[in-house]
Image: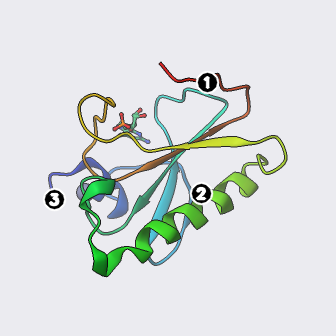
């Protein structure tokens, strides 16, 4: 979708600090980091949110999760730990409607989240 911010990042029309890319995903640092490491992992194909993944591309979710673990390793978080978050809809505070997983780490993360 041409008017989608993250589709534009996939197409390199908007710059981002890309930390990993393969045929199905792109990972880039969040513009407003909430932790020393805050990277977003997105599918290249436009999917609005996790609930919009259908049966045909359910393997995409597994691939996105595997990409999170790769990024965590690249960012040096494999030993210290990290959190993977996806906000869905209004109550969760989703602001960009192109599916993305947040990988947060590099500090202690409190629980439960606010
Ligand atoms: P959400 O609130 O939808 O779960 O997360 C959207 C995330 O995208 C936020 O953490 C926000 O800081 C990040 N973000 C919004 N616009 C941009 C941008 O243009 N570039 C990058 N790198 N991150 C962005
Ligand atoms: Zn999109």
Q: Which mark is residue 53?
A: none
| Cβ atoms at labels 3 and 2 below 8 Å apart | no
Query: Callout 3 environment at 10 Å: few (<14), some (14 to 19), or many (20+)?
Result: few
Separation of residues labelled 3 and 1 (CA atoms): 37 Å
Q: Nearer the viewer, residue 102 or 74?
A: 102
First in sequence: mark 3 or mark 1?
3
Instruction: Please name whichever residue, 59 or 14, is drawn nearer the observer in this view of the structure.
Output: 59
Q: How many marks?
A: 3
The structure residue drawn at horizontal position 60% and vertical position 66%, both measured from the top left corner, is 66
* Circle 3: element type: loop
Asked if 60 appears above or below 9 in the picture, the reply is: below
Residue 104 shown left or right of residue 81 in the figure: left
Instruction: Give residue 35's quadrant in the image.
Output: top right
Q: Position of residue 19 (x, y in %)?
A: 59, 56
Quadrant of the snapshot with the N terminus: bottom left
Q: CA distance from mark 1 to mark 2?
A: 20 Å
In the displayed structure, 50 sits above or below 31; it is below
- Nearer mark to the viewer, of 3 and 1: 1
- Tell us which disc is closer to us: 1 or 2: 1
- Ligand 2 - quadrant of the structure image: bottom left
Secondary structure, mark 2, is: helix
SS class, disc 1: loop
Q: Position of residue 32 (x, y in %)?
A: 47, 28
Residue tagged 2: 68
Q: What residue is disc 1 on?
A: 111
Residue at position x 28%, y 56% in the image: 51
Q: Which mark is residue 2?
A: 3
Residue sitting at x 68%, y 41%:
82
The structure residue drawn at horizontal position 72% and vertical position 49%, both measured from the top left corner, is 75
Q: Which residue appears farthest toward the right when viewing the image?
A: 79
3 relative position to 35: left or right: left
- Label 3 and label 2: CA atoms lie apart by 25 Å
């Amino acid at each position: 979708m041409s008017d989608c911010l993250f589709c534009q990042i996939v197409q390199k029309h908007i710059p981002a600090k890309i930390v990993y890319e393969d045929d199905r995903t792109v990972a880039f640092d969040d513009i407003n980091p909430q932790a020393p490491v805050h990277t977003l992992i997105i599918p290249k194909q436009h999917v609005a949110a996790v609930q919009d993944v259908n049966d045909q591309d359910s393997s995409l979710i597994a691939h996105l999760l595997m990409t999170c673990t790769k990024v965590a390793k690249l960012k040096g978080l494999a030993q210290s730990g990290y959190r993977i978050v996806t906000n869905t809809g209004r109550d969760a505070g989703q602001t960009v409607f192109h599916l993305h997983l947040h990988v947060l780490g590099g500090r202690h993360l409190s629980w439960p989240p606010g």
